[in-house]
């Protein structure tokens, strides 16, 4: 029997405050540090590992975190979720994105169909469509092959798929699996669509319109931009556009599209990279086989997330340590720092995933809570960040926990030796060095050159950023955020906080405003 | 006579804590809110305006902030800076980036030359070089015109110039001023250089190597990548490369380069967009006239920054309000949210500018301080962010002050009307709506749909994002960060916090490690 309790009612949570804090500088120095790096590692799917040696935890704290996981029934709640319970209580919806990549528990029937079969069917439809585009069976009206795919979507229909595309673009090129270039139009700023269209050979482009409801204003506006561009080029838009939407949306049955692929209300936008939302663009760009490998990686990560032992469940462990940092150590933010240029937009995706899921002040029953929830998430790739905001991370007055990501091998197999080492070695040497610099610091009599240390981090280490590794990485963070939502007793799957702005913007456009809003509208010439 | 005192020794700072806090929700409601929007606006250069109606300030607080500005001698300190005093005490350097765009005070002589004349000379040399490239007087060995410019640099040699390029790319195209595409290589990750080079026609590309010292490891490594690519294409690298460096660097006099343009130790990397670091790439991309307009905008903003009246000095006012939010209201971060796709990387530049300048724990004399300093800075363009992390900004448990930026007109003059309004109107309606949603919130019996409000923001409003407006915007934030450094009594112009990581990375590459660092190195296969 599952009970949904606020975090601060749990005995093991209260117990955390009584435990001695870890002195990270001491713990990570000398032989003790070496032992921690060897021991504090949890295996992830696809050969990745979550190493948390440089977090402020020790045996006692980890035991209590295990108790907290048990007391909060984290894996039981995950089981309820993947078995189809209505976990999104606000919108009264199931939460089924795990089914887009595997079947963890019982078959889930909803809307009169088996949902795993439904998602697989959409995936197969997309694969079939993509193969026909690649083979030239589906072409433009002139019988010429499509060479570019343009995704039109915003939020989850943009950030995740874009980050995944960038993560695999060079890997696919290197491995002869690159099929079509992908571009993205998202912002309602008309310069976004205009710029992308100006650099796109629209006659050979297929456009994917992504909107679950079929009513997202930004996306409909940008669709209109695209249709104008196609018409101006003497082309028939319906020969160039596909829709990714829900079966009940106005887009679903329209003759305006070459094809329609379906998602549903059980897939939140920020959890949709493994659904048709990511599937269409990634299958067109890299082929359905690559997308399938990506899904397999995500499914493998999901299978580790069912385990009760925190040492075997890295997503749950990561979640627990994050809550310890947020609520006990009181760190308000986390930086995501991938040492991989291919993951340049991965932090932006995690920013949405995490902040939109757990940036809430009421629990899943709508009652205000008395503890802090989701942290602020930001990040840029290393080593770039080292030459930018790391100054504050090392010597600023606030402590920011860090999530590093690193791979032993690069994607493109091209490298140079300078000063006796390859660039890839330099990249890896830098991330190792940073972990230690943050953890242990370095004393200097000149206080300006003094590093206090005590700044915690963890690192996900992998062999290479392949489709499978990327899927595992994505699912790891999805599941981490889910577990943190369970701990904080939040509904991580709605986003009521985005509604008020929409309502007020409509009022501005209808010129139905007064007071300050009218003044701002005047200043902005609306 | 200037005295450099810690913030917490100043009477007006202490006075701030005794003043009644502003209830933003009340203040921004009804007629009071309308009055604030009209009144709480400070004119910026180039027709921009800094509107701070939705900040938690009132007449009394503003009066005290004026007193604080006077007591902290902010404009006197700025005067000392632009007149060439050694403000960067740690590195014992002057701070002269303002001279790259104008002469605010007395002539500054250093290294035996007038520095304004020196920067102007470099600018003229760059303009001359760019014109010759554009006219075809300088070509590749085959006598063909260069069509692409690739900047090789990291940190300040990358983020600022890249953000500025993206900000003006579409404006230049629209106005027939686009000369050459620009690309950027920064990361030591070998996949960064490999990917950029794979998509570049190197035979028609000119590469700008940017490193003040001539020793930045990432940049030298990437130079080697580029040289290999040129040689592999049967080309002579020295016909394709220019250097931007200091006169004393090993790059300065090398025959390996078509030309060398100089900066010096008085221009910090993050303040170098208006120096040769930004000048070379922007002049090649858009022509020297556009770069000159950009400098004029920055110079105009600098001229407002000398004024003692906070109502006439928006950079100083912005700085004071930021310190009030950070130290009195205790908000630890700030989001930068430009409603302009062209400013997509502007937040990443401000992140470096701000966090690297003021993320410090010791004052300018190297003594530890007892108050918090630089906040965490992050951001993405709107409306994209609305569909992402705004959930936390609206309903999360922490309050994050917001810096909006908006323009009445878009850059490309292309637009569509959907549901009775243009995209540009929708964009502007959204930013106006967001300010009010954050400030006033909206009560709802369903706590899940309740918005508490009380979340402060300011907005910079402009006519259009032109080169002049961009220069003014850039200089505004540079000067804001400078004034905040004065308030916190920091040296905002060094970055000792980046050194330790470099030292440890070298040790890893030399295999001179033990303990945890050796274990990490092993895990990463170094």
Image (cartoon, coloured by chain):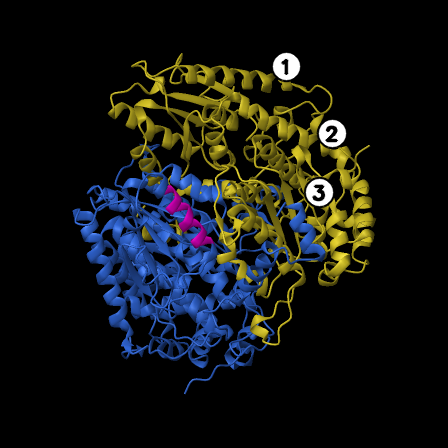
Chain colours: A yellow, B blue
- Assess disc 1: are there few (<14), some (14-19) or many (≥20) residues with their C-alpha within 10 Å of its C-alpha: few
The location of residue B525, given as percent across then percent down, is: 63, 45
Residues rendered magenta in the picture: B218-229
Q: Chain of mark 2?
A: A
Q: Chain of mark 1?
A: A
Q: Is residue B169 above or below residue A300?
A: below
Q: Element type at marker 1? A: loop
Q: Is residue B230 above or below residue A396?
A: above
- Residue at the top extreme, as displayed: A137
User: In the image, are marks 1 and 2 on the same chain?
Assistant: yes
Q: Chain of mark 3?
A: A
| Dominant secondary-structure state across the stretch colored magenta | helix
Q: What is the number of the mark on residue A489?
A: 3
Mark closest to the chain's N terminus, 1 or 3: 1
Q: Element type at marker 2? A: helix
Mark closest to the chain's N terminus, 1 or 2: 2
Q: Is residue B188 magenta?
A: no
Q: Quadrant of residue B415?
A: top left
* Position of the N terminus of chain A by quadrant: top right
Badge 1 is on which residue? Answer: A112
Depth order, front residue of B187/A44: B187
Contact flag, marks 1 and 2 (Cβ < 8 Å)? no
Q: Quadrant of residue B384?
A: top left
Q: What is the number of the mark on residue A80?
A: 2
Circle 1 or circle 2, nearest the eye = 2
Left or right of B278 on screen, residue A464: right
């Amino acid at each position: 029997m599952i009970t949904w309790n606020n975090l601060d009612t749990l005995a093991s949570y209260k117990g955390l405050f009584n435990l001695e804090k870890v002195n990270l500088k001491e713990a990570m120095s000398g032989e003790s540090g070496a032992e921690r790096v060897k021991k504090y590692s949890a295996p992830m799917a696809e050969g990745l590992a979550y190493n948390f040696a440089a977090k402020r935890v020790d045996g006692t704290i980890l035991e209590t975190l295990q108790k907290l996981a048990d007391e909060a029934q984290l894996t039981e709640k995950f089981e309820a979720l993947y078995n189809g319970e209505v976990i999104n209580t606000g919108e009264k919806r199931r939460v089924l994105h795990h089914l887009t990549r595997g079947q963890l528990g019982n078959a889930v029937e909803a809307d009169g169909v088996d949902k795993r079969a439904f998602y697989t069917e959409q995936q197969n439809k997309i694969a079939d469509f993509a193969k026909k585009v690649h083979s030239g069976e589906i072409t433009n009206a002139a019988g010429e092959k499509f060479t570019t795919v343009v995704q039109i979507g915003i939020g989850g229909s943009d950030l995740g798929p874009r980050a995944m595309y960038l993560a695999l673009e060079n890997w696919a090129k290197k491995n002869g699996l690159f099929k079509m270039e992908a571009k993205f139009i998202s912002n309602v700023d008309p310069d976004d669509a205009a710029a992308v269209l100006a650099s796109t050979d629209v006659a050979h482009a297929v456009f994917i319109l992504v909107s679950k409801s079929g009513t997202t204003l930004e996306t409909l506006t940008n669709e209109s931009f695209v249709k104008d561009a196609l018409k101006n080029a003497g082309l028939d838009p319906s020969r160039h556009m596909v829709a990714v939407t829900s079966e009940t949306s106005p887009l679903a049955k329209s003759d305006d599209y070459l094809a329609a692929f379906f998602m549903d209300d059980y897939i939140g936008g920020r959890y949709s990279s493994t659904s048709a939302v990511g599937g269409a663009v990634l299958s067109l760009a890299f082929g359905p086989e690559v997308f399938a490998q990506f899904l397999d990686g995500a499914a493998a990560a999901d299978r580790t997330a069912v385990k009760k032992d925190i040492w075997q469940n890295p997503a749950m462990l990561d979640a627990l340590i994050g809550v310890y940092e947020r609520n006990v150590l009181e760190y308000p933010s986390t930086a995501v720092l991938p040492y991989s240029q291919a993951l340049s937009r991965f932090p932006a995706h995690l920013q949405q995933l995490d902040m939109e899921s757990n940036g809430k002040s009421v629990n899943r029953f709508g009652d205000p809570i008395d503890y802090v929830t989701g942290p602020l998430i930001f990040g840029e790739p290393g080593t770039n960040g080292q030459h930018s905001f790391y100054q504050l991370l090392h010597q600023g007055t606030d402590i920011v926990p860090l999530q590093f990501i690193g791979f032993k091998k690069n994607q493109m197999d091209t490298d140079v030796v300078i000063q006796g080492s390859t660039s890839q070695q330099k990249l890896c040497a830098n991330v190792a060095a940073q972990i230690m610099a943050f953890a242990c610091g370095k004393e200097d009599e000149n206080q300006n050159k003094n590093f206090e240390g005590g700044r915690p981090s963890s690192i996900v280490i992998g062999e290479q950023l392949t489709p499978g590794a990327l899927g595992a990485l994505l699912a790891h963070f999805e599941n981490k955020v889910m577990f943190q939502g369970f701990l904080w007793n939040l509904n991580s799957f709605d986003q009521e906080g985005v509604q008020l702005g929409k309502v007020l913007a409509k009022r501005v456009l209808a010129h139905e405003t007064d007071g300050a809003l009218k003044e701002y509208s005047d200043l902005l010439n609306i």
